Image: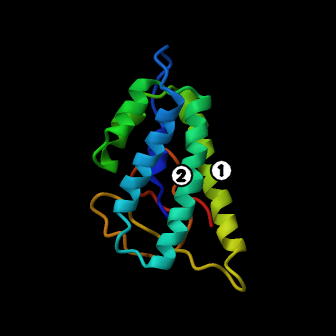
Amino acid sequence: MVVVALCACGKGKSGGTDKAPADECKQVTDHLTALQLENTKNVPEAQREKFVSMMKKVGDAVTVNCREMKWSAEVTSCLKNMKSLAEGDACQAKLTPEQKASVDKTVEDAQVQAVKEMQGSAGPGPMKHVEVDTSPSGSAAPAGSAAVAPAGSAAPSGSAAK
């Protein structure tokens, strides 16, 4: 299971009129991806490549969601200024319930699609899945199954898909 931090984009309230510029959304997902990748340095290269590929797909989907759901500048600024994934909850509290529900579904759908694509390109036999603990205190060492944690938490929470 690969735990994806981009789900940190999935909570909070921003229903105000102060909307973030569209490029802010891309900057948010780029920053969250960088934070996530910092926690995968000890992962074997083959699994890390798969993780990076998944992160790109999820990041692209979250960028679109951010734009379509019109996340506020307050939300995007909070997410862009995070120093660690552990700070995600404070930013998540700034999205509306509708934005949270939308991005949670977006992240889950992108993760499931990315896993299916990786399995399809894995060749004969089942793809070996890897769990990556990307929490700030985690070792980022592979564990055993590969899917993606459900959106809504920047901390690892188990597998969501196989």
What residue is rendered at 47% in x and 45% in y? Answer: 29
- Label disc, if present, on residue 162 of the rendered structure: none
What residue is rendered at 64% in x and 61% in y? Answer: 114
Which color scheme did the rendering employ for the protein? rainbow
**SS label for mark 1:** helix
In this view, the residue in front, 92 or 39, is 39
In this view, the residue in front, 26 or 18, is 26
Mark 2 or 1, closer to the camera: 1
152, above or below 94, in the image: below
Q: Which amino acid type is marked by label 1?
A: Asp
What residue is rendered at 59% in x and 28% in y? Answer: 69
Task: Answer yes or no: is residue 18 visible.
Answer: yes
| Crowding near the residue tagged with mark 2, few <14, some 14–19, many ≥20 C-alpha atoms within 10 Å | many
Q: Earlier in the sequence, mark 2 or mark 1?
A: 1
Which residue is farthest front?
A: 23
**SS label for mark 2:** loop
Q: Which residue is mark 1?
A: 109
**Position in image of residue 115 (x %, y %):** 63, 65
What residue is rendered at 48% in x and 15% in y? Answer: 16
71, above or below 159, in the image: above
**Position in image of residue 41 (x %, y %):** 35, 70
Q: Is 107 left or right of 139, judged from the image as shown? A: right
**Position in image of residue 130 (x %, y %):** 50, 74
Task: Answer yes or no: is residue 153 visible.
Answer: no
Q: Which residue is mark 2?
A: 150
State yes or no: discs 2 and 1 in contact (Cβ < 8 Å): no
161, above or below 5, in the image: below
| Crowding near the residue tagged with mark 1, few <14, some 14–19, many ≥20 C-alpha atoms within 10 Å | some
Q: Is 116 left or right of 13, judged from the image as shown? A: right
Q: Which amino acid type is marked by label 2?
A: Pro
